[in-house]
């Protein structure tokens, strides 16, 4: 059996008649950074709240770190750190004092405070009241509070939401170092593919409560390979001519223009020359990357119906 940090079976949550999370089998391998990706309202937060025992599942099972969450809730949650929505802290107290409260609650030696402060790079601001911190600093303090208990699993819900680019970059760097520095598994959610692509090693995509993809990041990036989009006169005719000559080309579903998997400069130039030679007017050529929406459509097989 593969060693999963999180392993759910047919996990379901209903609110009234509505199924928000639909029979999902989440498999989060140990020591991976699992990116839990989905548009707003897809069911990410609801899933995370179930994993943390904050709300009950309507049906299905949750195993965390090898144990059934229903039967071993307190024991399991000791080994899980989390940051869901904004971190809770006392704004008038310093970062240090906030962490001190956590150490007192959990019986952790005070020496650990400086370790985590250093780790999230907040030593300089440690003795300033948290209310003067930037959003990024508050988020880093939240991560320090989650890490201070030495969890084996860290769950972060949209940890970069609302941060500016440098704040995002800092959080990203912190997260990437986690499995290596602390030997822990991370699950983080986001509605941005670009965000997940840069930190995750493993990905799960949820859409309308259903897990529509789960696998190594590499498998997903293969699907999101860039392509060349071309605005051209008579796109259908151009696509047919290219196909006859062994090129991969088809009309783009959204625009009706030409779309090919060709991305190299030389090959693109050859293709344009060929089209111009056949008296096509090429108005515009752009390299595009599939958006999350396009990948969703592809994964859910709705592409053809557009
Ligand atoms: N307590 C609740 N009662 C009723 N409906 C709820 C409740 N919590 C969540 N929902 C509904 O479940 C759906 C999924 O919400 P959820 O917060 O899990 O999505 P999400 O993927 O985390 O999106 P977001 O990024 O916007 O938080 C939403 O339509 C929401 O309105």
Image: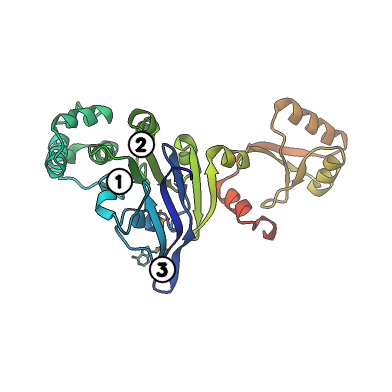
Q: CA distance from mark 1 to mark 3?
A: 23 Å
Viewer-proximal residue, 187 or 193?
187
The image shows residue 222, relative to residue 64, as above or below, that is above
**What is the number of the mark on residue 14?**
3
Residue with the most extreme front position: 1
Residue at figure coordinates x 84%, y 37% from the top left: 246
**Secondary structure of the residue carrying numbered label 1:** strand
Residue at figure coordinates x 81%, y 44% from the top left: 239
Horizontal side of residue 173 vs 278, given as left or right: left
Q: Residue 39 location, x and y as percent?
A: 47, 53
**Secondary structure of the residue carrying numbered label 2:** loop
Residue that label 2 marks:
184
Upstream in the sequence, badge 1 or badge 3? 3
Q: Residue 138 location, x and y as percent?
A: 25, 39
Upstream in the sequence, badge 2 or badge 3? 3
Residue that label 1 marks:
82
Marks 2 & 1, CB-CB < 8 Å contact: no
**Secondary structure of the residue carrying numbered label 3:** strand
Horizontal side of residue 8 vs 247, given as left or right: left
């Amino acid at each position: 059996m593969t060693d999963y940090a999180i392993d759910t079976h047919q996990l379901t949550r209903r609110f009234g008649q509505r199924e928000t999370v639909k029979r999902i089998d989440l498999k989060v391998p140990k020591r991976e950074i699992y990116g839990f990706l989905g548009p707003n309202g897809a069911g990410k937060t609801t899933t995370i709240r179930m994993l943390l025992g904050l709300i009950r599942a309507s049906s299905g099972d949750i195993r965390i770190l090898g144990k059934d969450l229903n039967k071993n809730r307190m024991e399991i949650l000791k080994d899980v750190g989390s940051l869901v929505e904004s971190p809770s802290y006392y704004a008038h107290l310093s970062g240090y004092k906030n962490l001190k409260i956590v150490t007192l609650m959990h019986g952790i030696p005070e020496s650990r405070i400086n370790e985590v402060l250093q780790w999230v790079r907040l030593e300089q601001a440690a003795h300033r009241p948290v209310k003067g911190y930037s959003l990024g600093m508050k988020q880093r303090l939240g991560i320090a509070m989650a890490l201070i208990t030495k969890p084996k699993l860290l769950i972060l819900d949209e940890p970069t939401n609302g941060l500016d680019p440098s704040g995002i970059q800092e959080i990203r760097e912190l997260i990437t170092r986690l499995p290596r520095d602390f030997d822990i598994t991370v699950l983080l959610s986001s509605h941005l593919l670009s965000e997940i692509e840069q930190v995750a090693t493993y990905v799960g995509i949820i859409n309308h409560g259903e897990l529509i993809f789960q696998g190594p990041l590499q498998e997903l990036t293969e699907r999101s390979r860039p392509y060349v989009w071309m605005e051209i006169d008579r796109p259908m005719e151009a696509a047919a001519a290219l196909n006859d000559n062994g090129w991969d080309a088809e009309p783009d579903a959204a625009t009706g223009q030409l779309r090919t998997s060709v991305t190299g400069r030389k090959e693109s130039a050859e293709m344009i020359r060929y089209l111009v030679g056949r008296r096509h007017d090429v108005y515009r050529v752009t390299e595009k990357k599939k958006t999350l929406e396009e990948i969703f459509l592809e994964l859910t097989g709705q592409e053809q119906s557009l």
